Image (spheres, rainbow, N blue to C red):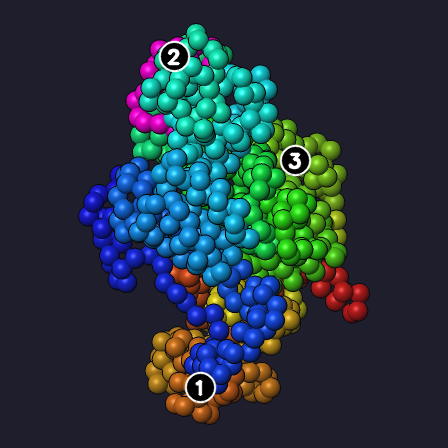
């Protein structure tokens, strides 16, 4: 991706200059709030901390605060540009801490190049922080600075330029060697570069099993040999007694692995050709690697390659590690980040690459399906599972190795906490999931051969939500699952083309024809209908051979609606059915109807939609407070949709005098209690917070939830949720992600549980 200077400068200067700000986390609107926040209330926690210093983690943000500290002597490929010039980079690092792991971070630029004075400055401010991320400090000073600070402070200290690259590349090396069929203890390793990152990487590789005697490290003078007299203590550790290799070209002959942490263009095609079978090349110089991806592939098509760039496969990117390593360290109040914690992170990252890739990652990278292999052996930085896989592994290692001051007793709850922290899960969705897990039902997935449906079925099974049944080709689905690395154990596959289903189709046809005999559906027509997966799957639910049905990725809604009406039918107390989307936003839960089914509802349809919405909100254990939306307020427009809504409200007020519903009204009056109650004190909604919005047509309802989804990246969207059918038939659409489908599945299971209780009590 090419970025112009203008774009970069505009990004950093537009609006409020810089990339981070401080946001209050406690109420501060009243005089009492301010008295609690500062004087006199603040004195109380101060004295508690004086009595017990560890209480600082209880009463302040220390336990979630990291300092990103640099003196600007080795900035991101720019070299020694000074502390102030490096500030944009440190701000960027702080931003990454926050968006990827919910860690608050301050950037601190220290204008000091003397290691001793720099160490003293960091030690002096350390009480503020729960951890310190050293950044962009040149070698060899960085080694002494990190060593001293780790020894003299009781909080985690990590120089990410060293250990971040080491951890991510180690995970990549484990998997690359596995793919190439090589053992770590056997590989011949060449490392180009002898700076902080190269030394840290190679030491970690040795910790994982690479033999020191099989390593050749090079600096700008060539191979580091034991007869050289110009070596620092760090370089001397890697000095070899071999005398048969002095240049990079000589070192590369027969090598299994090349790791470049040096500069662009050092490696030639001939050097790559001279390597062993299935060579592994990590060309990590940025922004231009030691050899380009294209040249390496051209020289050796069997090469397994990684770079530091996002536009090629297998990017070694430190953001895959440092946010989550500090997250695990902070959450256990660890005194340090030790070798055990780093190795735990390595193995967690390596293992994650082997797991099926979430749909959101495939979508961002615009690929059909990333699968473990030569082109994907390192997780992508946007993978939402990193927060749980890596942080939990690091936290467990901290506790096991004895450096944690805070225990985590329930790892399931900790996992939930991490997902909630990053907006991946909320208490609302968890309550739905927990209810479903208590009584998992048999759920049929109509488009069983669709990759999203397959992933959703596997995820729903793994989370204990349901017993999935896939409709589709029983030969094709297992082959696709194997390609996608999906385990279909325990998932039933039903092939509608299987001759053994002939009797079942006839049985279903007889039932359907009898049910709709006065609606033009004969036995022959019904039998023909049952060649369609929607009709067949819905009949499974109708006859009790399954409990719920999910469809919609392929099928047009008009066809799905037709099938649902024919097979399942509408609940007798209603004449229509519809759908609802739930918006779980920072301001609370909102229920929006009808978002999918009824395009241009008349008065009778709107009447039913309002009643259905009221019923559905109660289904989710919430008290509905409903506003019927229009572009005008309370009779000010006498024609069109406002008039229809006005008449519907009159009917509802007459038929349901206790129902908290009113309208027609504009959205701003619906959502602003103070504005509405002041101007329209006669409504049934006085002193109530609206949580349910019924729109006059599908276009406005659908647009509303999509706008909210687009502008609020933290909003959770659940739906569409079916309202009004006799059985748990639920819909998705072509844009649904795997997680969306799993959410709808959980709702379908909940619907099936409630439906069974209703039938049992009737």
How far apart in space, not on screen, are marks 1 and 2 (Cα)? Answer: 73 Å
Quarter in which the C terminus is drawn: bottom right
Magenta stretch, residue numbers: 250-270
Question: Which numbered disc flags the more N-terminal residue, 3 or 1?
Answer: 1
Q: In this view, does 319 lie above or below 62?
A: above
Residue found 47% across the figure and 70% down from its top? 25
How far apart in space, not on screen, are marks 3 and 1 (Cα)? Answer: 58 Å
Look at the numbered discs 3 and 1 and tell me whether their residues touch, using CB distance below 8 Å: no
Is 266 left or right of 466, judged from the image as shown? left
Q: How crowded is mark 2: few (under 14 residues within 10 Å), some or many (20 or more)?
A: some
Numbered tag placed on residue 620 in the rendering: none
Q: Is mark 1 on a helix, strand or loop?
A: helix
Judging by the rendered image, the residue that carries numbered circle 2 is: 246
Judging by the rendered image, the residue that carries numbered circle 1 is: 31
Look at the numbered discs 3 and 2 and tell me whether their residues touch, using CB distance below 8 Å: no
The reply to whether residue 281 is in sight is no
Look at the numbered discs 1 and 2 and tell me whether their residues touch, using CB distance below 8 Å: no
Numbered tag placed on residue 487 in the rendering: 3
């Amino acid at each position: 991706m090419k970025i112009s200077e203008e774009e970069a400068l505009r990004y950093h200067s537009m609006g409020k200059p810089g990339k981070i700000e401080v946001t209050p986390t406690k109420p501060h609107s009243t005089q009492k709030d301010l008295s609690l926040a500062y004087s006199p209330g603040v004195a109380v926690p101060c004295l508690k901390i004086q009595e017990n210093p560890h209480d600082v983690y209880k009463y302040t943000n220390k336990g979630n605060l990291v300092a990103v500290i640099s003196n600007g002597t080795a900035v991101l490929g720019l070299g020694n540009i000074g502390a102030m010039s490096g500030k944009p980079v440190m701000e960027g690092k702080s931003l990454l801490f926050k968006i990827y792991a919910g860690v608050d971070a301050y950037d601190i630029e220290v204008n000091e190049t003397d290691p001793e004075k720099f160490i003293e400055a960091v030690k002096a401010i350390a009480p503020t922080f729960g951890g310190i991320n050293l950044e962009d400090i040149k070698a060899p000073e960085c080694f002494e600075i990190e060593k001293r600070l780790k020894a003299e402070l009781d909080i985690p200290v990590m120089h990410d330029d060293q250990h971040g690259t080491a951890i991510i590349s180690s995970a990549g090396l484990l998997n690359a060697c596995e793919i190439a069929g090589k053992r770590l203890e056997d590989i011949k390793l060449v490392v180009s570069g002898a700076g902080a990152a190269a030394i840290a990487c190679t030491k970690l590789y040795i910790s994982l099993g690479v033999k020191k005697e099989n390593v050749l490290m090079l600096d700008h003078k060539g191979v580091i040999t034991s007869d050289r007299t110009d070596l620092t203590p760090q370089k001397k550790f890697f000095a070899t007694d071999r005398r048969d290799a002095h240049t990079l070209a000589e070192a590369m002959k027969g090598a299994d692995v090349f790791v470049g942490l040096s500069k662009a263009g050092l490696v030639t095609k001939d050097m790559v050709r001279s390597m062993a079978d299935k060579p592994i090349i990590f060309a990590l110089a940025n922004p231009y690697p030691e050899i380009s991806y294209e040249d390496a592939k051209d020289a050796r098509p069997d090469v397994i390659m990684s770079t530091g760039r996002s536009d090629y496969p297998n990017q070694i990117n430190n953001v895959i590690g440092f946010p989550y390593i500090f997250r695990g360290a902070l959450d256990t109040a660890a005194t340090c980040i030790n070798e055990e914690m780093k190795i735990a992170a390595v193995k967690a990252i390596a293992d994650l690459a082997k797991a099926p890739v979430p749909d959101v990652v495939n979508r961002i990278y615009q690929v059909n399906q990333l699968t473990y292999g030569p082109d994907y052996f390192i997780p992508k930085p946007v993978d939402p599972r990193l927060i749980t896989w890596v942080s939990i592994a690091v936290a467990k290692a901290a506790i096991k190795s004895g450096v944690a001051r805070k225990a985590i007793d329930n790892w399931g709850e900790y996992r939930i906490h991490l997902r909630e922290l990053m907006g991946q899960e909320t208490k609302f969705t968890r309550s739905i999931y927990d209810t479903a897990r208590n009584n998992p039902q048999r759920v049929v997935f109509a488009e069983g051969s669709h990759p999203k449906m397959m992933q959703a079925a596997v995820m729903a099974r793994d989370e204990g939500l349901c017993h999935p049944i896939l409709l589709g080709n029983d030969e094709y689905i297992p082959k696709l699952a194997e390609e996608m690395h999906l385990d279909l154990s325990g998932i039933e596959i039903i092939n509608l083309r299987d001759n053994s289903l002939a009797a079942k189709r006839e049985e279903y046809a007889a039932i359907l024809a009898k049910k709709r005999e006065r609606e033009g559906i004969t036995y022959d027509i019904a039998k023909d209908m049952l060649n369609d997966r929607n009709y067949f799957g819905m009949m499974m639910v109708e006859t009790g051979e399954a409990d719920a049905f999910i469809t919609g990725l392929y099928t047009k809604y008009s066809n799905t609606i037709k099938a649902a009406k024919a097979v399942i039918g509408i609940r007798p107390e209603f004449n229509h059915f519809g759908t609802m989307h739930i918006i779980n936003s920072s301001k609370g839960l909102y229920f929006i109807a009808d978002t999918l089914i009824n395009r241009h509802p008349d008065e009778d349809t709107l009447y039913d939609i309002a009643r259905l919405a009221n019923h559905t909100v109660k289904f989710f254990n919430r008290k509905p407070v409903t506003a019927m939306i229009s572009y005008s307020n309370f009779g000010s427009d006498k024609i069109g949709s406002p008039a229809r809504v006005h008449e519907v409200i009159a009917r509802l007020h007459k038929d349901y005098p206790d129902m908290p519903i009113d309208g027609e009204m504009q959205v701003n009056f619906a959502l602003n209690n103070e504005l509405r109650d002041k101007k329209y004190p006669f409504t049934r909604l006085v002193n109530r917070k609206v949580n349910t919005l019924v729109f006059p047509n599908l276009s406005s309802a659908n647009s509303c939830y999509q706008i909210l989804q687009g502008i609020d990246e933290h909003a959770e969207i659940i739906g569409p949720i079916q309202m009004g059918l006799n059985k748990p038939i639920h819909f998705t659409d072509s844009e649904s992600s795997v997680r969306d489908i799993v959410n709808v599945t959980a709702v379908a299971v909940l619907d099936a549980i409630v439906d069974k209780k209703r039938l049992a009590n009737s």
